[in-house]
Image: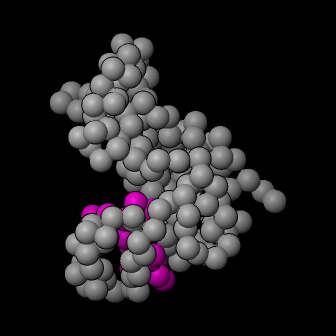
């Protein structure tokens, strides 16, 4: 999914820059990595400097992106909607900074499809969040994205290996803002 990003890209939940090797240098003009954790952004610094396109690291929360309206051609979010305290506000900010012709590329885990696994996610959620940086096992990323007004244009669903069953369903896709 990441190689599809193009133009001016904003990655929300940039962390230590784990996605950097997957960006296509022929398609990306500039990348702005946003993360609230300064330590993680510090780890991203050396990787960022070796990229063949401009990379800027911003310490900020997804709910308050310090970027202009209609700034980005692509916004990338990978495994972050589970930890953002207010994902609805973050999606509103993503819509604000995304050009009307832009795309949201996402890779997320979320609420399991099966009721038995969902019940276990509910039971484990509080404890898991405490040990996994606030990660919420029971969020539904597709519902969050469509609830924010985005239209899904591509959606891949899958399952994690058995050892990661508690992460529920795996979602990867592309969404676009609603027409003006």
The residue lying at 68 percent from left, 73 percent from top is 69
Q: Is residue 23 visible?
A: yes
Give the quadrant of residue 90: bottom right
Q: Position of residue 133 (x, y in %)?
A: 30, 47
Q: Up-down: is 100 above or below 120? A: below
| Closer-to-camera residue (102/112) | 112
- The answer to if 25 sits in the magenta stretch is yes
Q: Position of residue 31 (x, y in %)?
A: 44, 77
Q: Position of residue 3 (x, y in %)?
A: 40, 65
The residue lying at 71 percent from left, 66 percent from top is 100
Give the quadrant of residue 177: bottom right
Q: Up-down: is 93 above or below 114? A: below
Indicate the quadrant containing the C terminus: top left, top right, bottom left or bottom right: bottom right
The count of marks equals 0
Q: Position of residue 16 (x, y in %)?
A: 27, 66
The residue lying at 33 percent from left, 20 percent from top is 123
Q: Is residue 151 visible?
A: no
Q: Which residues are magenta?
A: 11-33
């Amino acid at each position: 999914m990441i190689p599809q990003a193009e133009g001016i890209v904003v990655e929300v939940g940039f962390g230590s820059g784990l996605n950097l090797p997957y960006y296509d240098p022929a398609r990306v003009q500039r990348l702005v990595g946003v993360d609230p954790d300064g330590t993680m952004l510090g780890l991203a610094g050396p990787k960022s400097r070796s990229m063949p396109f401009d990379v800027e690291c911003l310490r900020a929360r997804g709910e308050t992106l310090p970027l202009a309206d209609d700034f980005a051609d692509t916004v990338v979010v990978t495994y972050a909607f589970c930890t953002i305290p207010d994902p609805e506000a973050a999606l509103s900010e993503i819509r604000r900074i995304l050009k009307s012709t832009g795309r949201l590329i996402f890779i997320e885990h979320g609420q399991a499809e099966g009721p038995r696994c969902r019940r276990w996610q509910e039971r484990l959620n509080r404890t898991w969040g405490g040990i996994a940086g606030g990660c919420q096992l029971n969020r539904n990323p597709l519902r969050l994205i469509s609830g924010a007004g985005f239209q899904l244009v591509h959606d891949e669903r899958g399952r994690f290996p058995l050892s990661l069953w508690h992460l529920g369903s795996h979602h990867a896709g592309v969404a676009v803002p609603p027409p003006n």
